[in-house]
Each structure stands twice: as C-alpha cells, then as structure tokens.
Image: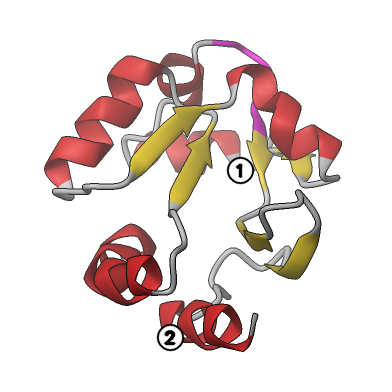
Amino acid sequence: MELAALQRHLPEIEAQGAKLVTITPETPDNSLSTKEKNELTFEVLFDEGNKVAESYGLVFELSEKLRPIYSKFGIDLEKSNGDSTFRLPIPATYVIKTDNTVAYHFADADHTKRLEPAEVVRVLKEL
C-alpha cells in the first residue's frame, strides 16, 4: 500500500526536482515482481543482506515465534530475500539532499506507521 501511495505522489515528488528510490532486501527477481505488480515507475534497489539498512541502524531479526505466522500468510523470507537470516529492515523514509546530507527522516519500529507521501512532498518544497 505504501509503494502505491508513493507512486501516486511521484509527479509531485519529481516536480520538486527529487528522485524517488526504494531499497529492499528482496532479491532482484522478487523486487521486479513487486514493481510490476504495483506498476511502479520508480527504482527499486536490492539491499543484499540488508547492508544499507544495517548502516542506518534499521535491521531487526524476526523472532522464532513470528516465523510460522509469516509462513502461514505465504511470506517466505528465505526465498524472497535469498538468505536464511530472517533479518528485516524497519520501514523508513529519508530525504537526502544532493550534498548527501539527510534533510529529513522518519522511521518507526511499528511497521504500520509510515510517513505519508504528502509529508515527503512538503519537506521537499521546504528545501
């Protein structure tokens, strides 16, 4: 749902001279499927082993208790991420300026809380 919301706001984001990129631990084959299924026109990059997410302090390991629940919902993390670590990134949004400094960020360990795309547009307008 978040990716679709970002796609809907993409023209406003690009109108501010920004480029939208998402980063996922899903293997390229799986992220391509996600991109096609959601008709995304922005880049979806592969973060092998969650190295980028880890550098931002955004990685957690899925507990043993939750793994069967994910499996029950048809989520095979080992297959989609191409490893057996059960490590996932905390969803986060960063606005990074052209000088590579972070102008704004949002991250919450509660995966149901996401930054509204309209807020991204507001931040970009203020830069």
Dominant SS type (magenta)? loop
Label 1 Cα crowd, 10 Å radius (few <14 / some 14-19 / many 20+):
few
Which residue shows up at 72% across the image and 38% down it?
Answer: 53
Q: On the picture, is 69 further left or further right than 75?
A: right
Q: Which residue is mark 2?
A: 118
Q: Position of residue 60 (x, y in %)?
A: 77, 41
Q: Position of residue 78 (x, y in %)?
A: 50, 17
| CA gap, disc 1 and disc 2 | 32 Å
Q: On the picture, is 100 further left or further right than 121?
A: right
Dot 2 falls on a residue whose secondary structure is: helix
How many marks the image carries: the answer is: 2
Q: Quadrant of the N terminus?
A: bottom left
Residue 117 appears in the figure: yes
Q: Position of residue 117 (x, y in %)?
A: 43, 77
**As drawn, 106 above or below 27:** below
Which residue shows up at 67% across the image and 53% down it?
Answer: 98
Q: Which residues are magenta?
A: 83-87
Q: Which residue is mark 1?
A: 66
Which residue shows up at 60% across the image and 18% down it?
Answer: 48
Q: On the picture, is 46 further left or further right than 86?
A: left
Closer to the N terminus: mark 1 or mark 2? 1
Looking at the rendered structure, the kind of residue marked 1 is: Leu
Q: In the image as oriented, which residue stretches furthest toward the top? A: 83
